[in-house]
Image: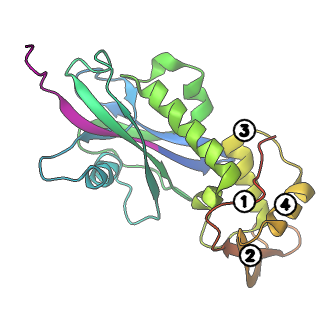
Amino acid sequence: MSRPTKMLVATDLVVLTVRDDRLQVLTIERGVEPFKGRAALPGGFVLPEEDLLDAAERELEEETGLSDIRVHLEQLATYGHPDRDPRRVISIAYLALVPDAPDPIAGSDAATAAWVPADELLTRPSRLAFDHHRILADGVERARAKLEYSPLAIAFCAEEFTIGELRQVYEAVWDAGIDPRNFHRKVSKTPDFVVETGGSTTRQGGRPAKLYRRGPAELLHPPMLRP
């Protein structure tokens, strides 16, 4: 009988935000081997006393300096190919969505941390260390798909937002233009998707626009289909 292989367990994070009207992902420059100096997704090993979610939350703060901000965090997938890491590491990846994200501050074993347009990394697989291109691709597709049938897009918005700002999130995540009037009609006719706050804003310029907040819907019916 063969002896079991000793493996390490880590968490990796696909942290997405919308900045400058583009979907952007948080990357770090690795400060240690393996792949020292290469770009990677933030993450690290799970400590013996930690739950997986606790480890993901700790790594998010330690490696990036992001704390005290509203974050949507969900488990994405598990990655365990023998060649993914020379140290024989299994990774449980998490998808994190943050609104109005500040500039990150690198920490722990990260030399630097930065927001990078997701499409620039998706089209250049060799830029990311380990199998992080695959993890990123899975995370972006998860976000794109869930925007169709859930109110997940609001995780990228401030607590109160306009329909125009919500549309810009959809356009950035889907990387596609959307007709403003058609989008407004779909959102307003989807039960419990958004709720008027009674306020308005001119922060986008022009006439005052109504402010909304998330409604109680967990699923969108009918769905918001991708162009």
- Of circles 4 and 2, the one toward us is 4
Q: Which residue is mark 1?
A: 166
Q: Give the residue at x 23% y 43%.
A: 108
Mark 3 lies on a secondary structure that is loop
- State which tag comes first along the sequence, 3 or 4: 3
Q: Which residue is mark 4?
A: 186
Tag on residue 4? Answer: none
Q: CA distance from mark 4 to mark 2?
A: 17 Å
- State which tag comes first along the sequence, 1 or 3: 1
Q: Give the residue at x 45% y 31%.
A: 135
Q: Which residue is mark 2?
A: 211
Which quadrant is the C terminus positioned in?
A: top right
Neighbours of disc 4 within 10 Å: few (<14), some (14-19), many (20+):
some
Q: Please provide percent x and percent y for residue 129.
A: 38, 23
Q: Give the residue at x 15% y 46%.
A: 47
Residue 84 visible in the current orientation: yes
Could you tell me if the residues under marks 4 and 2 are in contact, i.e. CB atoms within 8 Å?
no
Residue kind at label 3, given as amino acid type: Asp
Q: Quadrant of residue 90?
A: top left
Q: Please provide percent x and percent y for residue 103.
A: 46, 51
Residue kind at label 1, given as amino acid type: Leu
Residue 81 vs 180, above or below: the answer is above
Q: Which residue is mark 3?
A: 175
Residue kind at label 4, given as amino acid type: Lys
- State which tag comes first along the sequence, 1 or 4: 1
